[in-house]
Amino acid sequence: MKKLLLIFILVILLSCKKNEVVDIDMDLKCPTVARVGSNTQAEGKWKLLQGSTVFYDTRTVDYSCNEVIYDFRSNGIVIITSDIQELIGTNPGEHSYEFTRKPLFEGGNYFTIKINTNSVSCRISDGLMTLDDSAFDGPILHLARM
């Protein structure tokens, strides 16, 4: 009976999945960690860390101290919430999205995300997502998986 109980406890402990996190290696105002997950899936909640414009009105904004959340849902809806008014990128609200496992253009990042009608190059690695629309004079957004 003791062996059975020990085996049962061992199975439970081994089946518990660690929620691994990594420190973000960016120069941010507020310390932030990202939850490690699939590098081939956008679904889930992501916190906007930084947004940059590279051509028109060149600037970089640190959002690490704010609560700007992109919630990519399995039904093709992304809900963007924000505690501030002015954002680089898509405005807060409910938007349609499509995640495609192919690059937007040859030599680009691994995936494409289309939010409403805007297709953006996407890269996911170690709990970080980069949405790069700079090839079309758009912003570059850096998000961390929550």
Image (cartoon, helix red, strand yellow):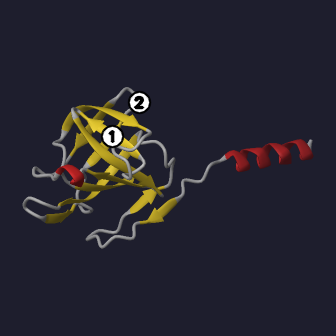
| Element carrying mark 2 | loop
From the top left corner, tell me how far across and down residue 119 is, in percent.
Answer: 27, 39
Q: Residue sitting at 7 percent across and 61 percent down? A: 57
Tag 2–tag 1 contact (CB < 8 Å) = no
| Element carrying mark 1 | strand
Q: In front: 22, or 1?
A: 22
Is 145 situated above or below 94?
A: below
**As shown in the figure, which amino acid type bears the numbered disc 1?**
Ile
Residue under label 2 = 74
Q: In front: 114, or 75?
A: 114
From the top left corner, tell me how far across and down residue 96 is, in percent.
Answer: 27, 30
From this viewpoint, is residue 146 visible? Answer: no
Residue lying farthest to the top in this orientation: 75
What is the C-alpha distance between the residues marked 2 and 1?
14 Å
In the rendered structure, the answer to whether residue 81 lies left or right of residue 38 reads: left
Q: Residue sitting at 13 percent across and 60 percent down? A: 55
Residue under label 1 = 113
From the top left corner, tell me how far across and down residue 145 is, in percent.
Answer: 40, 51
In the rendered structure, the answer to whether residue 42 lies left or right of residue 62 reads: right
Callout 2: few (<14), some (14-19), or many (20+) C-alpha neighbours within 10 Å? few
From the top left corner, tell me how far across and down residue 130 is, in percent.
Answer: 34, 54
Q: Nearer the viewer, mark 2 or mark 1?
A: 1
Q: Earlier in the sequence, mark 2 or mark 1?
A: 2
Q: Residue sitting at 16 percent across and 52 percent down? A: 137
